[in-house]
Amino acid sequence: MAESDRPRPLKEAARLTLMLDAVFGKDRFDRAPVDVRALALEYSAQIAPQGRIHEVVQRDIPGCVGALVCSETLPRQWAIMYHLGQSPGRRAFTIGHELGHFLLHRRMIETDVTFGLGIYCDENSVDRRAGSGLEQEADAFAAALLMPLHDFRLQLPAKARPDFEVLSRLAERYGVSLTAAVLRWLEYTETRAIVVVSNEGFALWAKSSDAAFKSGRFLRTKNTVFELPGQAIATRRDFTDEAKMGVAQGAGVWFPEPLVEMCIRSDRYDQELTLLHFDEIGTGLDEVRVEDTLDMFRR
């Protein structure tokens, strides 16, 4: 595929964001998040009237959180499916992810026999935002569509060190899960921070901000088992209001420097979400402001 023909998830998300801003106003998030289900149905009918998305439905698809499928007959007719029991925030991101596949990859899905007329996305592809190739592109699209950086940065400046209360308000503003909101913030923050998702005292995955990573503050969780420190909140299962707001951890607990640890637990998903804030702001390294694709579009 030529470079000019490659899907551009941020460009596609910016195109839709500009359209939604024009229709609903730039202050639309003050009133409601993106209605991604309605958007998928209506926008697909505009751009592909003969092969649009006909339904966005809940289905039992074991091992997957979402899927985009099409008919065997031509012209292809499409449907987005999301797995049973997802919270509203997680469901919105799943639908956004599958809409991304439709806008970016539908030609490939309907013509390449290896797809079998559908693409099925597991939790690693959608929630961890650590997939590769097509999944990474669909993930980037969903995040940019549901949580545009130009609005997110206004709500939470790049140098701020938010707690879970602040991040939860942003998750509600954008109609996404708390994890999705935390990961979006990590993309542009100038502070050193790490998010860790764990269960039974072991990290399932972790992600560092750029500033944290550049200073050597990251956890290796891919293809290895990382056991949480004995004094970690999740290990002690000390899920109090104080833990949610943040407690000081001394040097040597997580890293060779002190930090502030925040932790909450989701009984629904049987996981803990830990946020590590380091005492220093930034790294002293040259850092480049993350430019929203929407900024480039407007220029």
Image (tube, rainbow, N blue to C red):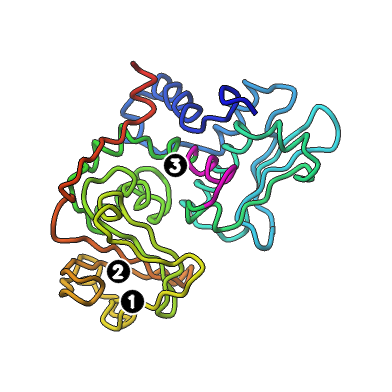
Q: Secondary structure at mark 3?
A: helix
**Is 221 on the left-hand or right-hand side of 99?**
left
Alpha-carbon span between mark 3 and mark 1: 27 Å
Answer with mark 3 or mark 2, whichever residue precedes in sequence.
Answer: 3
Label 3: which residue? 143
- Please tell me whether residue 164 is drawn above or below residue 244 in the rendered image: above
| Residue nearest the viewer, comparing 210 with 247 | 210
Pointers 2 and 1 in contact (C-beta within 8 Å):
yes
Residue shown at the point (80%, 38%) measured from the top left: 71
* Mark 2 surroundings within 10 Å by alpha-carbon count, few (fewer than 14), some (14 through 19), many (20 or more): many
Q: What residue is shown at x 25% (from left), y 66% (from top)?
A: 262
167 with respect to 138 (left or right): left
User: Please, what is the three-letter code of the amino acid marked with disc 1?
Assistant: Ala
The magenta stretch is 131-141
Where does the image place residue 104, in percent across and percent down from the top left? 60, 32
The CA distance from mark 3 to mark 2 is 23 Å
Quarter of the image where the N terminus is located: top right
Q: Is residue 138 in the magenta section?
A: yes
Three-letter code for the amino acid on which mark 3 is drawn: Ala
212 inside magenta stretch: no
Helix, strand or loop at label 2? It is: strand
- Crowding near pointer 3: few (<14 within 10 Å), some, many (20+)? many
* Secondary structure beneath label 1: helix
Q: Which residue is mark 1?
A: 234
Where's residue 117, x and y in %? 77, 42
Q: Earlier in the sequence, mark 2 or mark 1?
A: 1
Quarter placement of the C terminus: top left
Q: Which residue is mark 2?
A: 263
